[in-house]
Image: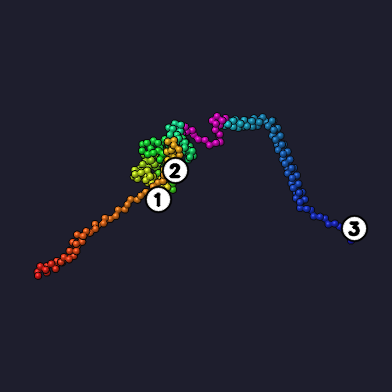
């Protein structure tokens, strides 16, 4: 082969090199456009400043608008700082009597026994002591009037609703004492209607009345608790045991005694005996003999034939 006549073929450009060249050209173009744009913007600003400096009317109008905007902004910020509120935040009309709607009692104003109960229940059920203080004070007052142990009322509230005044069961029992509002609607009439079931003190009063009636009907606390919970398909011992155990705990706190570690179990209610139909008395030997003689006695036809013979 003649090295003089040999021609080396040209290499095709690499894709990476072509892409790099395209990006470099784009970058240089953006720099040029940006530079030209900034130069144009600067030119416009310079022309505008020169124009405003030469035209006093335009300059005065612009200064007045800018000053008015700054004054309005300053007044808004000053008003917000004076009343301590954020002008962009949600605001409400003042209502100084809102605290009167809250059912609370300051614990330090209660008797020592009630303070101990309120603080213990507050820690156990994670409820603020102020509303619990009001419930404890009301339970002690109702208990004295209704001849019921106030710690029993508090135990029922603890088991039924855990001191949630807005609790509702699947069957419709409502409020602290879980009273069936639709059944005891008449008891809420003196309190403004059935919606009073969600008022803590009203629910406590109605619940205490219902419990008092149940105990009177059953003749015992255990029986009254069974009627109160409406035990139909079961004997209700599970409920009685829970309420009575919590009752003993709260009672121990009120009396300043050590917390009990064992609790009595509820007894199974004994069903009343079924009355049987009265049985006829057993026959005596004399009755048997008379019956036999009666069987041997002649019939009326036989007696007439005997008389004719």
Vertical comparison of 303 with 255: above or below: below
Q: CA distance from mark 1 to mark 3?
A: 116 Å
> Compared to 227, does 308 lie above or below?
below
The stretch drawn in magenta includes residue 98: yes
SS assignment at label 1: loop
> Residue, x 59% and y 32% (percent of image)?
73
Question: Marks 3/2: CA distance?
Answer: 117 Å
Vertical position of residue 300 compared to residue 34: above or below:
below
Q: In x, y percent, where is residue 197?
A: 41, 41
User: For the magenta stretch, what is the residue range?
Assistant: 78-100
Task: Please tell me how crowded label 3 is: few (under 14), some (14-19), or many (20+) other residues with Cα within 10 Å.
Answer: few
Looking at the image, which residue is at 42% across and 47% down? 238
Q: Which residue is mark 1?
A: 234
Instruction: Return the residue nearer the eye: 69 or 114.
Output: 114
Q: Which residue is mark 2?
A: 262
Whether residue 139 is in magenta: the answer is no
Q: Report helix, strand or loop for mark 2.
A: loop
Tell me the residue that label 3 is attached to. 4
Q: Calculate the distance from the C-alpha at mark 2 to the C-alpha at mark 1.
A: 24 Å
Question: Quick one: 48 or 198, which is closer to the camera?
Answer: 198
* Mark 3 residue element: loop
């Amino acid at each position: 082969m003649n090295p003089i006549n040999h021609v080396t073929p040209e290499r095709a450009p690499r894709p990476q090199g072509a892409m790099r060249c395209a990006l470099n050209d784009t970058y240089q173009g953006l720099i040029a456009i940006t530079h030209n744009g900034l130069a144009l913007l600067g030119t416009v600003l310079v022309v505008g400043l020169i124009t405003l400096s030469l035209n006093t009317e335009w300059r005065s109008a612009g200064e007045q608008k800018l000053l008015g905007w700054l004054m309005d902004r300053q007044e808004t910020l000053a008003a917000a700082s004076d009343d301590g509120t954020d002008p962009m935040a949600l605001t409400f009309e003042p209502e100084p009597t809102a605290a009167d709607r809250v059912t609370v009692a300051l614990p330090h104003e209660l008797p020592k026994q009630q303070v101990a109960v309120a603080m213990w229940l507050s820690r156990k059920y994670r409820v603020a002591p102020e509303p619990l203080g009001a419930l404890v004070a009301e339970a002690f007052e109702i208990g004295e009037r209704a001849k019921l142990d106030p710690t029993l009322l508090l135990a029922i509230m603890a088991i039924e609703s855990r001191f949630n005044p807005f609790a509702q069961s699947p069957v419709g029992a409502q409020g602290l004492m879980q009273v069936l509002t639709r059944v005891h609607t008449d008891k809420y009439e003196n309190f403004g209607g059935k919606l009073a079931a969600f008022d803590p003190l009203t629910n406590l009063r109605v619940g205490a009345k219902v419990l008092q009636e149940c105990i009177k009907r059953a003749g015992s606390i255990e029986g009254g608790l069974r009627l109160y919970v409406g035990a139909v398909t079961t004997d209700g011992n599970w409920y009685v045991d829970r309420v009575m155990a919590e009752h003993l705990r709260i009672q121990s706190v009120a009396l300043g005694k050590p917390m009990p570690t064992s609790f009595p179990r509820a007894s199974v209610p004994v069903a009343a005996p079924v009355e049987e139909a009265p049985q006829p008395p057993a026959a005596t030997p004399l009755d048997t003999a008379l019956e036999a003689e009666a069987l041997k006695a002649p019939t009326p036809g036989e007696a007439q034939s005997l008389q004719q013979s």
